[in-house]
Image: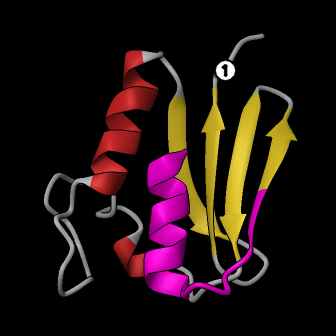
Amino acid sequence: MENLFDNAVRHGGERVTVTVDRLSDGFSVEDDGPGIPAEERDDVFEYGYSTADDGTGFGLNIVAEIADAHDWDVAVSEGDGGARFEVTGVSD
């Protein structure tokens, strides 16, 4: 969660709004920042991938690794104005 929130602020600025919602089998984290272009969505979870000048490219890779360690799935899509991450396969 911290990495998703940090990414939202890093790319959307300090006034970005982040919303967390429950899904039937997980949760979503969505922001109202600039979003992630469709052509880059397959790459954002890759180790070392970053569009920030001072980015390490570890943040979203860590999100994917944690999801995988819990047998969850994580995907990125376009939200209602920014990036939307959906974590599914989460059991109660």
Q: Magenta stretch: residue 44 in it?
A: no
* Part of the protein shown in magenta: 1-19
**Whether residue 37 is visible:** no
- Along the viewing direction, whichever of 92 and 40 lies nearer the viewer: 92
Task: Residue at 84% x, 39% y: name it.
Answer: 22
Task: Residue at 20% x, 66% y: name it.
Answer: 49
- Along the viewing direction, whichever of 86 and 60 lies nearer the viewer: 60
The local secondary structure at tag 1 comes to: loop
Left or right of 89, for residue 80: right
Q: Quadrant of residue 19?
A: bottom right
59 lies above or below 22: below
Task: Residue at 73% x, 39% y: name it.
Answer: 27
Which residue is identified by label 1? 90
User: What's the residue type where badge 1 is placed?
Assistant: Val
**Whether residue 63 is visible:** yes
Left or right of 68, for residue 85: right
Q: How many marks?
A: 1
Question: Which residue is at the far front?
Answer: 14
Residue 66, how many percent across, how many down? 39, 29
Residue 34, how many percent across, how many down? 57, 89
Left or right of 50, for residue 20: right
Q: Magenta stretch: residue 15 in it?
A: yes
Residue 88, how many percent across, how many down? 65, 32
60 lies above or below 57: above
Task: Residue at 67% x, 87% y: name it.
Answer: 15
Left or right of 17, for residue 57: left
